[in-house]
Image (spheres, rainbow, N blue to C red):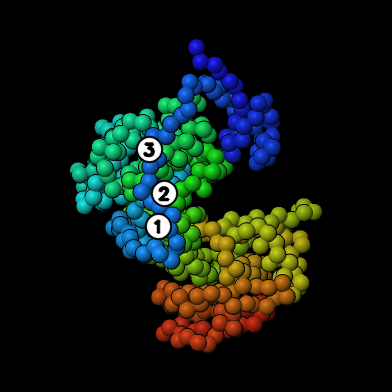
């Protein structure tokens, strides 16, 4: 009979301990230690994939540069987030809340790719008939897509070797298990080992592999953080289940930018890409109301116009509340301190709430001027012009600093019908202004507020 050994493993980072601890000494997470029973095997565990390689050590200058064309998915929003298409042999991890549409998105991608390439869709959560029912609801023809329902990694590897697909989808990694790892499917050991084997399979056989990962209640992909370091690209599919719009965001990409974002709309027939998200974010805004401003932000290479809303109300408590949705909380406190010091606004007795409409998260400094103007607008109960756009970084002394890619931002504002763009003074010059919009340069927030409320 095989000998057993009980250890405790952290579900957040994979740290192992011979005894249970409330706090993990490696990642400082609480209540993450779970018992893992290990069986002592008779021989060493062997890898599934072949370890032999034909590569040899070479000088970098002697290696010839080969152009590896990316494979397009014919979904422009998806290709943009990936950096222009799918790189052969890459390992892509996509995570999101349950029911957000991860499997639907990948099924649509596989249906389009299967028209010209060999694609294998492996489902560990559904049977092939259930996958067929889900594919029938889509507008795309998925008749050439190969589907397989299996959770054993060894059987999956043998199937991949026989079919030799160009693209592989694993849905999901938490349901796949390695037969030589004794822990349960979905545990840290299983997720780490299965991902390692899938990475070897993708690199050795030059198969572009997509892995679906579940997320925890904190919004992180379940499993060790090592999982995100192993893969080439990490995508998060975000959105509210009560709304139809979904956001695909890249948080790691070895072959492209990590600031790209794709917008989709969930319908009964699948996901439809939104080609003009600025118009979508502004379609429900109310013009000429206090506390509302428009900012032109950059999401990767795409300019995006969104609405920043502020609500400033008197407080009845000694410590006023500062709440921000879509904007960094510390950034909000800093900008309110600048308004108090440089403009004399008494905000110490006011609660302040900031929200970016549409669920977009803005983390670039060009949003500062829009937040400043919206707070002052709500505090004074004065509305700004509905066709104004504010762009600029605000310093601690009240100056407005230059921002990058000002030309693309102003062109996007002009395309959507805005009449004035208030930008940093140092961004004026060196480029041609678009027709139909007045570009005004300012040096400090005093000039910005005077123009906004004139």
As drawn, is 264 to the left or to the right of 315?
A: left
Q: Is residue 269 visible?
A: no
The secondary structure type at the circle numbered 2 is: strand
Answer few, some or many: residues within 10 Å of disc 1's Cα (few below 14, many 20 plus, some between 14 and 19).
Answer: many
Image coordinates of residue 419 in percent, x first then y, are: 47, 80
Q: Identify the mark nearer the N-term, 2 or 1.
A: 1
As drawn, is 369 to the left or to the right of 286?
A: right
Q: Identify the mark nearer the N-term, 1 or 3.
A: 3
Q: Which residue is mark 2?
A: 92
Give the vertical position of 410 relative to 32 (above or below).
Answer: below
> CB of mark 2 within 8 Å of CB of mark 3?
no
Image coordinates of residue 242 in percent, x first then y, are: 45, 46
* 52 or 431: nearer the viewer: 52
Q: Quadrant of residue 144?
A: top left
The secondary structure type at the circle numbered 1 is: helix
Q: Which residue is mark 1?
A: 82
Q: Which residue is mark 3?
A: 49
Image coordinates of residue 162 in percent, x first then y, are: 25, 37
The secondary structure type at the circle numbered 3 is: loop
* 102 or 59: nearer the viewer: 59
Give the vertical position of 132 relative to 397 (above or below).
Answer: above
Q: Is residue 200 visible?
A: yes
């Amino acid at each position: 009979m095989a000998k057993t050994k009980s250890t405790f493993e952290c579900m957040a980072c994979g740290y192992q301990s011979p005894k249970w601890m409330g706090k993990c000494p490696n990642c400082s997470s609480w209540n993450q230690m779970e018992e893992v029973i290990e069986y002592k095997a008779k021989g060493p565990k062997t890898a599934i994939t072949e370890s032999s390689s034909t590569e040899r050590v070479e000088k970098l200058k002697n290696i010839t540069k080969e152009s590896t064309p990316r494979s397009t998915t014919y979904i422009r929003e998806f290709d943009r987030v990936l950096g222009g298409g799918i790189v052969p042999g890459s390992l892509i991890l996509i995570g999101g809340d349950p029911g957000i549409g991860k499997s639907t998105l990948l099924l649509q991608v596989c249906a389009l790719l299967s028209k010209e390439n060999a694609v294998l869709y492996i489902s560990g959560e559904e049977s092939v008939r259930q996958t067929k029912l889900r594919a029938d609801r889509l507008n795309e023809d998925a008749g050439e897509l190969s589907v397989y329902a299996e959770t054993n990694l060894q059987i999956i590897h043998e199937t991949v070797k026989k079919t030799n697909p160009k693209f592989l989808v694993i849905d999901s990694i938490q349901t796949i298990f390695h037969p030589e790892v004794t822990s349960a499917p979905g545990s840290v050991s299983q997720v780490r080992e299965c991902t390692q084997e899938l990475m070897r399979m993708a690199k050795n056989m030059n198969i572009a592999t997509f892995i679906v990962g579940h997320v925890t209640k904190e919004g992180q992909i379940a499993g060790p953080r090592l999982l995100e370091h192993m893969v080439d690209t990490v995508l998060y599919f975000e959105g509210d289940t009560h709304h139809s719009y979904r956001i695909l965001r890249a948080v790691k990409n070895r072959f492209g930018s990590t600031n790209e974002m794709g917008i989709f709309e969930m319908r009964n027939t699948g996901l439809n890409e939104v080609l003009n998200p600025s118009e979508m974010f502004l379609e429900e805004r109310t013009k000429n109301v206090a506390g509302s401003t428009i900012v032109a932000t950059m999401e990767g290479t795409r300019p995006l116009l969104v609405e920043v809303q502020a609500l400033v109300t008197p407080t009845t408590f000694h410590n006023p509340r500062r709440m921000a949705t879509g904007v960094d909380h510390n950034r909000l406190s800093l900008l309110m301190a600048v308004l108090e010091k440089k403009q004399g606004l008494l905000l110490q007795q006011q609660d302040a709430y900031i929200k970016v409409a549409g669920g977009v998260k803005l983390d670039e400094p060009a949003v500062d001027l829009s937040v400043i103007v919206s707070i002052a607008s709500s505090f004074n109960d004065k509305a700004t012009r509905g066709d104004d756009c504010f762009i600029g970084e605000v310093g601690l002394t009240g100056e407005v600093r230059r921002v990058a890619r000002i030309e693309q931002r102003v062109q996007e504002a002009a395309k959507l019908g805005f009449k004035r763009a208030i930008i940093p003074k140092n961004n004026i010059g060196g480029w041609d202004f678009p027709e139909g919009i007045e570009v005004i340069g300012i040096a400090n927030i005093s000039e910005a507020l005077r123009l906004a409320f004139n």
